[in-house]
Amino acid sequence: MTEKEKKTVVETSGTAQKDPRRTDAMRKTQRIEAIMEIVRIVAGMAIAYIVALLILVAISDDPVFIVKQFILGPFSSPRRIGSIVNLAVPFTLCGLSMCFMYAVNKFNLIGESIFMLSGCIITWVALAIGQNMPAIILIPLLLIVGAIVGAVLSFIPAIMDRKLNANVVVVSLMLNSVIAQLAIYILRYYMKDPGISFIGSYELPKQIQFATLFGKMRIGAGVIIALIAVVIVSIIFFKTAFGWKMRIVGSNPKFATAVGLSTLGISFAAQLAGGALAGVAGATEIMNSYKRFQWTASTGHGFDGLLVAVLAKKNPVLVPIGALFLAYVRIGADVVNTSGDIPYEFISVIQGIIILLVAAESFLSGFKNRLIYRSVQADKAKKSA
C-alpha cells in the first residue's frame, strides 16, 4: 500500500461511535472494519480446518475414510449433534467470561480453576441443603453460589495486579493449580461416595439435574442459560455505560484516563464480572451434564473460553459461533480417534493455527485497508462530481 493510501486510511479510521457529526465516510469505514473482522475470523477458522484435513490425509492409513469421518461424523447421528451443542454450552459461558477480561486487556486466566471449584462447591451445597428444596429455588441459588465463587477467586489475581503490580497472567496460572487441588481435597474428604468404584461425590439431587431437550439429541437445558447469558452480556457490552467504558479502557487506557475514567476500577470490575460468569459456567456444566461431581483434574474449559473469546474478537454476539465451531472440531476429533488411527491430540495443532491467524492483526489487514481507501476515494469522487 502506498503512503497516500495509508494516510487516507489513518485519517478516516475514527471510532467515535456516538458522535452525531460522524461523516458518511466514517460510517462506511467502520462498516468495512466490522465486516472484515468477521471475514478474518471465518478465514482463520477455514484455513485451520483445511490444515486439519491435510494432516489427517498425511498421517492416516485410510485418509478418505478418516476425512469423511472428521467432516461428517459429528452430524452422523442426533446424539452426536446434541453432543456438539452440549459441549458448546460451557465453551460459550467461558468465552463470555473471557470477553470481560479481553475487553480491558487483563488476561486473568483464573477461569480455568473457577470452573472446577464452582462445580465442586455447588455440589457440596446441593448435597448439604438441597434434598428437599424445590428446583425453582435451588437452581438459581446454586447459580448465584457459583457466581460468588467465581467473583471471589478472580478477586485474588485482580487485587494482586492492582496493589502489588504482579503479572495477572502468571498469578492466575499459578493459582489454577492450587485451587484445583483444593477442589480435589473437598471431593475426597467431604463428598466422596464410598459406594462407587471411582472417585466421585454422592449423586446430585434429582431436581437440579437438568432435563434433556429435543428427543434423541438429548440437548441439556443448560443451553437456555447459555443463550440468556449471551443476550445479557451483549446488552452490557453494547447498551450500557459500563460496556462502553470497558471498551474504551481496553482500546486506549491513556485516553480513558484523560477523560476521567477510572481505568483501574473498570478493569477490576470487568475481571470480577468475568470470574462470576466462569463460576456460573462451572455450576451449569455440573447440573447440565453430570449426576455427581467427579473432576479430579482441570477440565480445560477455562482455556477453551480464551480460545473462543479470541475467535469472537471479544464480541459476545459472536461467542456462540466460535463455541459451536470449537465443539464441532472437538467432536470430529473424538470421532476419528475412536473410529480410526488418529490421536486426539492433533486437535492442539488446529487450535494453535486458529489462534495464530485470528489473533494476528496483520492477517488480511492490507486487503481491509485497500477497501477503506477505495471507499474514501469513491466518496471524494462523488462529492466533486
Image: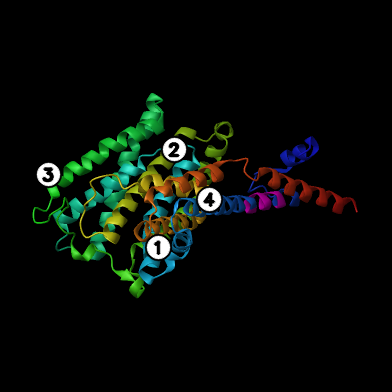
| Residue 85 badge | 1
Work out how far the residue at label 3 is from the one at label 4, CA to CA, in angstroms: 46 Å
Work out how far the residue at label 1 is from the one at label 2, CA to CA, in angstroms: 27 Å
Q: Are marks 3 and 4 in contact (CB under 8 Å)?
A: no
Work out how far the residue at label 3 is from the one at label 1, CA to CA, in angstroms: 34 Å
Q: Out of 205 and 330, give the one closest to the viewer.
A: 330
Q: Which residue is mark 4?
A: 51
Residue at screen point 21% across, 65% down = 207
Q: Are marks 4 and 2 in contact (CB under 8 Å)?
A: no
Task: From the viewer's perspective, tell me whether residue 57 is left or right of residue 24.
Answer: left
Residue at screen point 31% across, 44% down = 114
The answer to whether residue 330 is above or below residue 270 is below
- Locate the N terminus by quadrant: top right
Magenta stretch encompasses residue 185: no
Please state which amino acid type lies under the numbered disc 1: Val
Q: Which residue is mark 3?
A: 189
Q: Residues within 10 Å of mark 2 (few under 14, many from 20)?
A: some
Q: Are marks 3 and 1 in contact (CB under 8 Å)?
A: no
Q: Which residue is mark 2?
A: 107
Q: Position of residue 119 (x, y in %)?
A: 26, 51
Query: Which secondary structure lies at badge 3?
Result: helix
Q: Nearer the viewer, mark 3 or mark 4?
A: 4
Looking at this rendering, what residue extends furthest in the front direction?
Answer: 61
First to last magenta residue range? 28-35
Query: Which secondary structure lies at badge 2?
Result: loop
Query: Which secondary structure lies at badge 4?
Result: helix
Q: Nearer the viewer, mark 4 or mark 2?
A: 4
The answer to whether residue 87 is above or below residue 102 is below
